[in-house]
Each structure stands twice: as structure tokens, then as C-alpha cells.
Image (cartoon, rainbow, N blue to C red):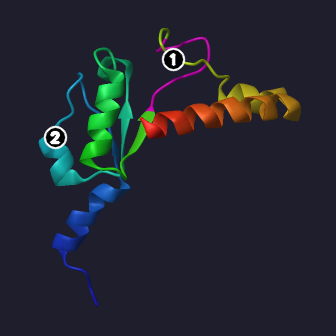
Amino acid sequence: MVLGLGVAAAQAGSFLVVSFKGSEPPWDLLRRVRPAGVILYPSNLRQDPEGLVRRLKAFDPKLVLFVDQEGGPFTSYREGVVRFPSAMALSASGDEAWWSGWAGPWGARCAAWERT
């Protein structure tokens, strides 16, 4: 069976991660495209980051949310966030004990965010 263009177009969004400018998502576009995820930048999170995350997850609980965070000398988010070492720093250290030490707090923070 050959899929029609309508089906392919309807499923194309499931391969996309999108971003947007400002603090209000383009809800009409998100409804039409149905992306797999949204990457959030500092400009998206200035006003009410937790509220934005809640609204996006209420819109689509399966939506994967990403936060742009360099983790190196450039740090977008300075206040109100838990600072973790970057994946690159953890990997470059070669210190498995250090990795293990961060795994618990990192996982706990991610689990707490998921519950909000």
C-alpha cells in the first residue's frame, strides 16, 4: 500500500523539533504541524518558564521539551536554575565517580520537573 501525500504531510511534523520567538508559542502552527518537540531559548523563558512548560505539556503531553543550554563559558540561564556540569565536562573528566555523583541529583531534578 502506498501512503498518500495527505498521510505523509500529516506525519511529517513528528520528525521536527521547532523553536519560536518570544514568550508565547505559535499555537496555531503547533496544532497544524504537531512537532515531536520544542526547543526553548532564554527569550522564551523570561516571563513565566514554569507556566510555559505547563501550557506546552497540557497542549501535548508527548511533546518533548528541550532547553538550549551551552554549559560552557556561555551560560544562558543564570538565575533560578540548578547548575549541572555539561555532558562534555562529565565525559572529558574520565572520572566515573564524578559522573555517578551527578547522576542522582540530575535524575531527581528531571523527575521533579516532570511532576510539575
Q: Residue 103 appears at what percent x and percent y?
A: 72, 35
Please give the name of the residue rendered at 27% of the width and 64% of the height, measured from the top-left corner.
11
Q: CA distance from mark 1 to mark 2?
A: 26 Å
Range drawn in magenta: 67-77
Front residue (pair 24, 51): 51
Q: Pointer 2: what residue? A: 27
Whether residue 18 is in magenta: the answer is no
Determine which quarter of the picture holds residue 106: top right
Front residue (pair 45, 2): 45
Q: Under tag 2, what secondary structure?
A: helix
Please give the name of the residue rendered at 46% of the width and 39% of the height, measured from the top-left corner.
115
Whether residue 76 is in magenta: the answer is yes
Q: Residue 68 appears at what percent x and percent y?
A: 46, 27
- Left or right of 84? Residue 27 is left
Q: Residue furthest bottom?
A: 1
Kindly identify which numbered label has been placed on residue 81. 1
Determine which quarter of the picture holds residue 27: top left
